Image (cartoon, rainbow, N blue to C red):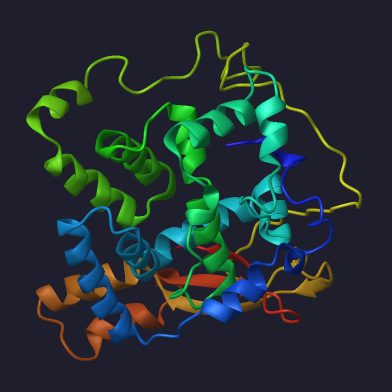
């Protein structure tokens, strides 16, 4: 989703690179390294507590961090292959009271997303500052993607017109599950729906419960009509030139310009087993090919995903999926 109307209000001081956003320093102060076993224990514990006490935001956050690695990589890949998403990954802007002028949001026209966002926060007595910093994700880029997801959560509420009660949260979780594929959002949508009272459940699938795209929205021309949630985009010229080159990566090292350090490089590759490798190995075990034969898929290029990284700054550049 594009938030051009909010772009000029988010961190004018974030004009150069991601260290300007303060995320890196906050991440370094709060990051807690964990082993795979510890992550499993945290996942089980946080899932159990979240099930019985769904208002424990800290437990839901922990569950999202310890189970969302693959989904976060999916989101990151989507952002890398989109010029605006790539820009967000590089600048790492934040959405909180120190980066957004809520006074300006309040004074914006009533048919803008900025004003609708301010009204949502004011009406529900919530603040973007309540979003905790990521702690248990070891990759700093994935950590930022998770932080970004948390900080745009209230924008989902705003666009969907959903309150912060149980029904509103479950509705938003389902939308987020389809958009982000985070296991935590899917489990929240499933188990949250189970906890809804019958009287509320009878209204969940009533036509009109979830707002749809405004009447007249053109998917082909991408020109929205006048609507409180679809303001005309306002483009703000950046004080510096941001060059984004999207080069598709393949099974071999690729010559490109690194989107992080902006140097011309030949990517380093790292091969990892794909889902196809595990399924093939499992099939071989089922038909009785134990020991050596079941390991062959992990040695075949056709069953290995190829991850590309910059040899100079170690930035993740994309993945070729078999």
Q: Quadrant of the N terminus?
A: top right
Residue situated in front as seen by the camera: 290 or 192: 192
- Residue 188 is situated, as x and y percent measured from the top left of the image, at 26, 49
Residue situated in front as seen by the camera: 290 or 4: 4
Left or right of 75? Residue 188 is left
Q: Is residue 5 visible?
A: no
Above or below, comparing residue 311 to residue 192 in the picture: below
- Residue 168 is situated, as x and y percent measured from the top left of the image, at 32, 34
Above or below, comparing residue 63 to residue 29 in the picture: above
Q: Quadrant of the C terminus?
A: bottom left
Seen at 33% across and 67% down, the residue is 67
Seen at 60% across and 19% down, the residue is 220
- Residue 240 is situated, as x and y percent measured from the top left of the image, at 91, 52
Q: In the picture, residue 289 is in which quadrant?
A: bottom left
Left or right of 56? Residue 242 is right
Residue located farthest toward the bottom when viewing the structure as drawn: 291
Total of numbered circles in the picture? Answer: 0
Q: Is residue 48 visible?
A: yes
Left or right of 197? Residue 77 is right
Residue situated in front as seen by the camera: 273 or 168: 168
Residue located farthest toward the top when viewing the structure as drawn: 216
- Residue 25 is situated, as x and y percent measured from the top left of the image, at 66, 75
Q: In the picture, residue 14 is in which quadrant?
A: bottom right
Seen at 60% across and 21% down, the residue is 230
Q: In the picture, residue 318 is in which quadrant?
A: bottom right
């Amino acid at each position: 989703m594009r938030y051009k109307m909010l772009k000029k209000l988010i961190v004018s001081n974030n004009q150069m690179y991601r260290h300007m956003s303060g995320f890196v320093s906050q991440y370094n102060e709060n990051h807690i390294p964990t082993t795979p076993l510890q992550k499993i224990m945290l996942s089980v514990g946080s899932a159990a507590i979240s099930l019985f006490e769904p208002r424990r935001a800290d437990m839901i956050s922990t569950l999202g961090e310890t189970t969302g690695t693959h989904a976060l990589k999916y989101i990151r890949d989507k952002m890398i292959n989109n010029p605006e998403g790539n820009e967000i990954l590089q600048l790492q802007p934040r959405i909180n009271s120190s980066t957004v002028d809520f006074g300006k949001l309040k004074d914006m026209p009533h048919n803008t997303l900025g004003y609708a966002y301010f009204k949502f926060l004011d009406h529900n007595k919530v603040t973007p500052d309540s979003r905790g910093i990521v702690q248990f994700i070891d990759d700093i880029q994935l950590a930022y993607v998770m932080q970004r997801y948390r900080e745009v959560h209230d924008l989902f509420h705003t666009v969907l017109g959903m309150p912060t009660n149980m029904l509103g949260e479950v509705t938003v979780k389902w939308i987020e599950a389809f958009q982000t594929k985070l296991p935590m959002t899917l489990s929240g949508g499933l188990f949250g729906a189970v906890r809804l009272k019958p009287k509320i459940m009878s209204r969940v699938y009533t036509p009109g419960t979830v707002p749809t795209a405004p009447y007249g929205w053109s998917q082909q021309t991408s020109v929205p009509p006048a609507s409180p949630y679809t303001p005309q985009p306002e483009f703000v010229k950046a004080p510096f030139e941001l060059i984004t080159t999207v080069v598709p990566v393949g099974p071999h090292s690729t010559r490109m310009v690194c989107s992080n350090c902006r140097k011309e490089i030949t990517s380093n590759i790292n091969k990892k087993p794909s889902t196809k490798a595990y399924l093939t190995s499992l099939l071989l075990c089922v038909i009785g090919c134990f020991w050596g034969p079941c390991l062959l898929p992990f040695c075949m290029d056709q069953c290995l995903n190829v991850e590309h990284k910059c040899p100079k700054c170690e930035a993740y550049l994309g993945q070729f999926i078999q």
